[in-house]
Image (cartoon, grey):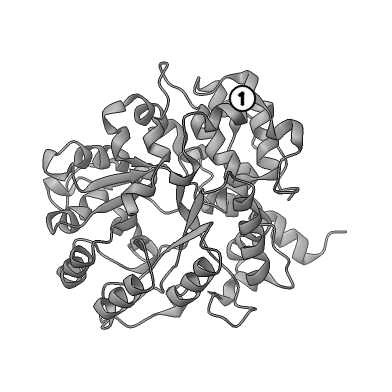
């Protein structure tokens, strides 16, 4: 007979996958095409797979030293006592979604449960070392939720990864890692924290407004926007619905892409994570009670405004997930006029959550040669970072692939 623990965990699995952004699956495509769990095989591909023509073709015409994966999460549970923090609900079966989400993400990252912080970094480094020399990952710090007075609110925070910890990890392995700070703009020390992060080599600032409690359209952010412009650092901010980290109260509204007009109008360089490819938002240009549209349509509106061309970018992280692929991939592949404004990112460790991405579904959508599916799936079993790169290099719509420059992102940050 199943234990109460197992029953609760099993009952929560579907809800947890939904919370991780699973969405509806493609018709006739199985939910589980490669198992529920990441097999965590050796990160270096077996020699025949490493020499496969698909892998070689993915790197053709690419300078690996210019390839930065701009969306790689650094997480931990705090067992190292060096800074990372995970909300206590993640260990409680009374909070089954948070509980299963923790187990799912830890498996995706292939961590040792007895040494989570250390083994997360070790596995990520191993994945990066299996890439050609010069390729790097931009590691993302993650700030607490803060209230309107700028006070941190741990009880409304799912996890925390401090800037100091992220900087130390990146600086230990500078041949593979860069880093981005995460600074809540309502903090009283926000401008000083930004200056400190820039001094330590931060390449960007990461926000997730839905979960952190940030309204990008608020005047509270103006001093921080001015500081970002002075520092010359871009803002990498989530837009659209958030399906992985808890969004509190009306937090999903904070992900409306049109709220990013304020930083853009202040001259901030803005990278919209995932091209706002999930969920719907109010057309705020028509007022607070305007009609609802897809967030991707609202992002498209911003991209097409000439005044934002020098400032606005989108990253293509997570776009191969089931809940996003049908929304944005075909459009982004075909919009070659946008390719100079798109940046490659993976959203690791979500690339290792096996049910989130269906390679078969992408082939069924006509975005991938079906003959390449088995090879790409096998790459994923070894190296979810390389898998994401190869998969996005092989995507095609109407004979068009993402341009080389989408993947050579280093110049944007340097």
**Within the image, what quadrant is residue 375 found in?**
top right
Write the residue at 67% across / 37% down.
Answer: 379
Judge by depth and name the residue closer to the eye, 282 or 405. 405
Which part of the image, by quadrant, shows the N terminus?
bottom right
Residue 249 drawn at (x, y percent): 36, 66
Q: Quadrant of residue 216?
A: bottom left
Horizontal relation, residue 113 to residue 258: left or right = right
Relative to 225, residue 286 above or below: above
Q: Is residue 178 left or right of residue 224?
A: right
Residue at image position (60%, 73%) is 77
Against 359, residue 230 (above or below) is below
As drawn, 201 above or below 368: below
Mark 1: few, some, or many residues within 10 Å (few <14, many ≥20)? few
Of residue 291 and residue 271, the one placed in the foreground of this image is 271
Outermost residue toward the right in this view: 1
Residue behind mark 1? 28
Query: Looking at the picture, how far across and down is residue 228, in whole percent?
Result: 23, 65
The structure residue drawn at horizontal position 56% and vertical position 23%, both measured from the top left corner, is 363
| Residue 44 seen anywhere in this rendered image of the structure | yes
Residue at image point 18% right, 45% down: 310
State the residue in front, 84 or 360.
Answer: 84
Q: Is residue 136 left or right of residue 408?
A: right
In which quarter of the view is residue 48 placed? Answer: top right
Residue 288 image point, x, y percent = 16, 53
Number of on-image labels: 1
In the rendered image, the vertical position of residue 60 relative to residue 131, given as above or below = above
- Name the spot of residue 104 as percent of width and height, x first: 65, 56
Q: Quadrant of the C terminus?
A: bottom left
Residue 32 in sight in this render:
no
Secondary structure category for the residue under label 1 = loop
């Amino acid at each position: 007979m199943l234990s109460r623990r197992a029953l609760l965990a099993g009952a929560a699995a579907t809800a947890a996958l939904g919370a991780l952004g699973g969405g509806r699956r493609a018709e006739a495509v199985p939910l589980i095409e490669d198992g529920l769990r990441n097999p965590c095989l050796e990160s270096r591909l077996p020699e025949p797979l490493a020499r496969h023509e698909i892998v070689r073709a993915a790197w053709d015409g690419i300078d690996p030293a210019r390839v930065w994966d701009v969306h790689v999460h650094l997480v931990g549970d705090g067992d190292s006592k060096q800074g990372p923090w995970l909300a206590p609900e993640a260990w409680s079966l009374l909070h089954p979604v948070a509980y299963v989400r923790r187990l799912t993400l830890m498996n995706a990252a292939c961590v040792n449960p007895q040494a989570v912080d250390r083994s997360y970094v070790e596995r990520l480094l191993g994945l990066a070392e299996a890439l050609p020399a010069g390729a790097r990952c931009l590691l993302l710090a993650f700030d607490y939720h803060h209230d309107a007075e700028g006070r941190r609110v741990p009880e409304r925070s799912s996890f925390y990864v401090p800037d100091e910890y992220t900087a130390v990890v990146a600086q230990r392995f500078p041949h593979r890692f860069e880093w981005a700070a995460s600074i809540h703009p309502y903090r009283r020390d926000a401008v000083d924290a930004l200056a400190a992060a820039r001094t330590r080599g931060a390449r960007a600032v990461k926000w997730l407004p839905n979960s952190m409690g940030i309204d990008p359209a608020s005047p509270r952010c103006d001093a921080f926007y001015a500081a970002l412009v002075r520092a010359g650092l871009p803002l990498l901010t989530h837009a659209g619905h958030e399906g992985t980290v808890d969004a509190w109260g009306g937090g999903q509204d904070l992900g409306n892409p049109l709220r990013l007009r304020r930083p853009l109008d202040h001259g901030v360089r803005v990278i919209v994570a995932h091209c706002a490819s999930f969920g719907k938002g109010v057309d705020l240009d028509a007022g607070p009670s305007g009609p609802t549209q897809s967030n991707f349509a609202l992002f498209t509106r911003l991209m097409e405004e000439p005044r934002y061309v020098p400032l606005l970018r989108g990253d293509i992280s997570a776009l191969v997930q089931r809940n996003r692929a049908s929304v944005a991939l075909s459009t982004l592949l075909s919009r070659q006029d946008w390719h100079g404004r798109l940046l490659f990112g993976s959203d690791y460790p979500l690339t290792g959550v096996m049910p989130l991405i269906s390679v078969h579904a992408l082939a069924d959508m006509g975005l991938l040669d079906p003959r390449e599916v088995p090879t790409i799936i096998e790459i994923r079993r070894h190296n979810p970072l390389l898998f994401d790169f190869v998969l996005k290099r092989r995507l095609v719509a109407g004979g068009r692939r993402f341009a080389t420059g989408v993947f050579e992102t280093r110049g944007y940050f340097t």
